[in-house]
Image (cartoon, rainbow, N blue to C red):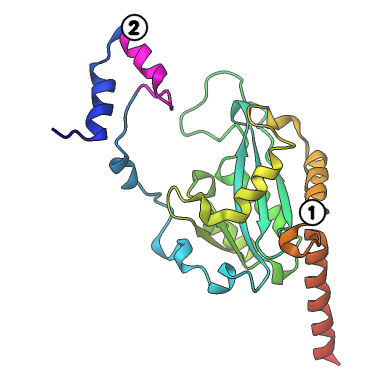
Amino acid sequence: MRISHEAIYQALYVQGRGAQRRELTACLRTGRALRVPRARTRGRGKSFITPELLISQRPPEAADRAVPGHWEGDLIIGLGSSAIGTLVERTTRFTLLLHLPRMASHGAGVRVKNGPALAGHGAEAVRDAIARTIVTLPAQLRRSLTWDQGAEMAQHASLRIDTGVAVYFCDPHSPWQRGTNENTNGLLRQYFPKGTDLSVHGADALAAVALTLNTRPRKTLDWRTPAEALHEILQSAHTASVATTT
């Protein structure tokens, strides 16, 4: 006799009742009280993501890191849905942190359905934070941005118009497609531990942490720092532009 794993899960979720159900649920790794078959979740897609925006359509130059200006982004989430945005340049590993403060009405009263994202990392807040940060960079360092399929990037079209940065999305449940960003997020957890309130860190504190990472020598950069690698690229671009005008 053979039985699938899905049948076992359904038996645990459907047959358990009362105290027995709570005891069985506590034994599950996720602790979920409801079961959603994995096959059903695979079929779900984000309405704001079309095929031409998937990572498979990203220019080859972004994949091989030969050309700077291609970024990976994500949110790190803390206690009470607090969040910090992270942007990492693929060639130099240079890191920018996005301050995403909660809205003043966060935690006050009942949340309005379809209202603004009070936690501070809704689509509009994330779009504005990325645009405000990335437009400070030279045009040659604003080529593309790769993100996961989180709803916080629903305003990607406006972001592209405002900044000129092409936005691409990873395949569902594929964080390794943003490997540089995932590695950086792991380093950032030294400063922003899981389970802590990230809203207590102001913009100046985030800038200080980013400076620490950007001045840390990296083996993958032949022991240069991300800041040094970025400076070399900018210096080279400046020299080339001077040469063409003389």
- Looking at the rendered structure, the secondary structure element under dot 2 is helix
Query: Residue 89 falls in which quadrant of the image?
Result: bottom right
Amino acid type at circle 1 is Asn
Q: State which region is magenta.
A: 20-33
| Position of residue 233 measured from the top left corner of the image (x, y, whole percent) | 78, 72
- Residue 55 marker: none
Magenta span contains residue 22: yes
For this orientation, the residue located farthest to the front is: 1
Membership of 185 in magenta stretch: no
Q: Which residue is mark 1?
A: 214
User: Image check: 233 left or right of 180?
Assistant: right
Whole-angstrom CA distance, mark 1 to mark 2, is 52 Å
- Answer with left or right where residue 86 lies relative to residue 40: right
The amino acid pointed to by label 2 is Ala
183 over 70 or under it: above or below: above
Q: Which residue position holds label 2? A: 19
Q: Position of residue 187 (x, y in %)?
A: 70, 44
Q: Position of residue 41 (x, y in %)?
A: 33, 42
* Badge 1 or badge 2: first in the primary sequence: 2
Residue at left offset 29%, top offset 41%? 40
